[in-house]
Image (cartoon, helix red, strand yellow):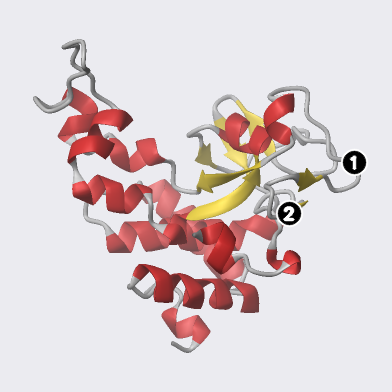
Amino acid sequence: MLERSVYQQQDERTTLYCEASFNNKKQVTFPEGFATTKHVKRAKKVEWEHVVPAENFGRNFSEWREGDERCVTSKGKSFKGRRCAEKVNQEYRLMQSDMYNLYPAIGAVNAMRSNYNFVMLSDQQSSFGSCAMKISDRKAEPPSNARGVIARSYLYMDKTYPKYSMSKQQLQLMNAWDKQFPVTQWECLRADRIAQLQGNKNSVLAESCGS
C-alpha cells in the first residue's frame, strides 16, 4: 500500500537513509559512492524499515515475551516472540503495520541497522561509503537528512501507543532532532496520503503541516 499509494511518483521513491532511488519492481539504484560488504544480495532491493524497531514495542506484549496458548505450530510446538504477538494481538498488529513508522531503506542498510537505537557516534566512519549511515557497537547514527523524519516517527509512536514509551535520553535526542531538522513538504504530503489510507492523522505533524 505504501509503495503503490503513498510513494506514487518516481521522484518520491527515495530511501530514508541513503536517498537511493527505487522503482516499482523494488530495484534500487545506488547513489554514487555507496558501498556495502555485508548483505550484498539484500542491497539490490528496497525494504520497508520500522524506524522504531518492532522489538522496541513488541517486547511490551506478553505474547512476545511469554507466548500464548494459541501460539502452537501444527506439530504442537509452542512459540513466542514477534510471530506470536502478530498472530494473536490486534494492538501489536496495528503498531507493526502503522505506515507512519515505515520508510523505504536499502535492504542491506535495513539489515545492518537491525533493532539498534539511534545515537550520535563520535569519530565513527560511515558504514556505507558515501552514505553517512554509521553503525557501531549495536548503535546507529543516521545521516542528517533522515534525523527529523526519524525523530517525528519516534515521537508519533510514543504519543499514539500506550505500549511504547521512550527513555528519557532517547526522548531528549528526538526532541532535539525534531527542532533541528524541520518538517518538509514531502513529509506533509506523505502524512496526508497515509491518513487517507490508514484512517488516523499524525498528531505530531498536524501543526507543522497545517492539518
**Mark 1 — residue?**
33
Q: Is residue 165 visible?
A: no
- The location of residue 129, given as percent across then percent down, is 84, 36
Which image quarter: residue 140? top right
Q: Image quadrant of residue 79?
A: top left
Question: Residue shown at 70%/42% (left/top)?
Answer: 133
Q: Counting residues from the N terminus, which is met first, the one under dot 2 or under dot 1?
A: 2
Q: Residue at x 38, y 56 (%)?
A: 98
Query: Residue 142, relative to residue 113: is it above or below?
Result: below
Q: Looking at this view, is 172 or 3 the one in front?
A: 3
Q: Position of residue 207 (x, y in %)?
A: 44, 84
Figure quadrant of residue 134: top right
Q: 10 Å neighbourhood of mark 1: few (<14), some, or many (≥20)?
A: few
Q: Which residue is at a point 44% across and 87% down the rendered structure image? A: 211
In screen coordinates, is 129 left or right of 188?
Answer: right
Q: Is residue 187 above or below residue 65?
A: below
In the picture of the structure, the residue carrying the numbered disc 2 is 23
